[in-house]
Amino acid sequence: MFNQSVTFKYLVTLLVTIWIPHSSVAYDLEKGLREAQEGNYAAALNELEPLARQGIVEAQFTSALIYMQFFDSAKAEKLFREADKRNHPKASFYIGLIYQSGLNGVHDPAEAVKWFFRSASFDNPDAHYMLHTAYDQGIGEIEKDPEAAFMYANAAASLGHTDAQFKLALFHATGEMVEQNLALAHMWFEIAGFADTFDQASQRQRTELSLTTAEEIQEMLDLIATQLTLRELLKARLQARICVASNYTDCEL
């Protein structure tokens, strides 16, 4: 459902590439982020923690990631909360994960869902996907709701969440939660598995696919292709590329 190690590496890499003003603070921040990216976590914390105490939100968030991954979940939660006070878009998601997993000694799915809702308000695709799971399975105080589950899966997919894109493809292929549409299923399967190979990529950062493999998706694509006319198949493949190029704003067939 959620690969913490992969996401940690992705987030640190993303933070290194953000625009940072030229200053001594910016220099120390970039140095700390690069140390974290290279796996030098003690050195990274040496640079980042003084900045975190000064209220530098990216230092707070990255320090929290390091503590959550390797050292001290209680300190991680404290730093995530500090970053969340400054509206870091991903801090609330990780607070939700801490409550969901019980890393802070308190397993509280209902509290986790509250934090996922807050993170979703920042258009965090992982948070939308977790809310899809909550409504799909019934978690915390949330009862199963297929319509809401589909809505949050669709929102996550439109934000570049590959597992959500895969789930949308399954829904359209099976007719679960939505009327069966094999052309749309083909479109979303191809996006989930192979959008990175399209000539024009989305500007949205894609998450890692964890529910299946590209090889299995290709098998599904081959199977669905036998049930579509050539016209339908070509239209689905074209629309997949239009969907991605439009940053998932034009994905209807």
Image (spheres, grey):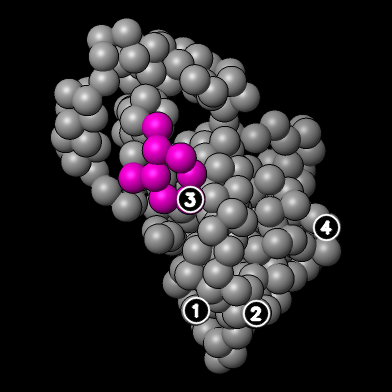
Q: Position of residue 242 (x, y in %)?
A: 50, 14
Whether residue 175 appears in this view of the structure is yes
Q: Which residues are magenta?
A: 174-181
Contact, CB < 8 Å: mark 1 with mark 2? Answer: no
Residue closer to the observer: 57 or 104: 104
Residue for badge 4: 86
Give the alpha-carbon distance from disc 4 to disc 3, as whole Å.
37 Å
Q: Position of residue 190 (x, y in %)?
A: 33, 28
Helix, strand or loop at mark 3: loop
User: Which amino acid does the dot numbered 1 rest on?
Assistant: Ser
Q: Earlier in the sequence, mark 2 or mark 3?
A: 2
> Are the residues at dot 4 and dot 3 in contact (C-beta closer than 8 Å)?
no
Q: CA distance from mark 1 to mark 2?
A: 16 Å
- Could you give the CA–CA distance between mark 1 and mark 3, rounded to whole angstroms? 28 Å
Quarter of the figure that contains the N terminus: bottom left
Determine the residue positioned at 30% across, 15% down: 233
Circle 4: element type:
loop
Give whichever of discs 4 and 3 has the lower sequence position. 4
Image quadrant assignment for residue 197: top left
- The amino acid sitting under disc 2 is Glu
Q: Position of residue 128 (x, y in %)?
A: 60, 53
- Between 98 and 78, the residue placed more toward the observer is 98
Q: From this view, report whether residue 205 is shown above or below residue 110.
A: above
Magenta stretch: residue 178 in it? yes
- Residue wearing tag 1: 101
Q: Residues within 10 Å of mark 3 (few under 14, many from 20)?
A: some
Mark 1 or mark 2: name the one nearer the start of the chain: 1
Q: Nearer the viewer, mark 4 or mark 2?
A: 2
Pointer 2 residue: 141
Q: Residue at x 45, y 16 (%)?
A: 239
Query: Residue 54: within the magenta?
Result: no
Residue mark closest to the camera, 2 vs 3: 3
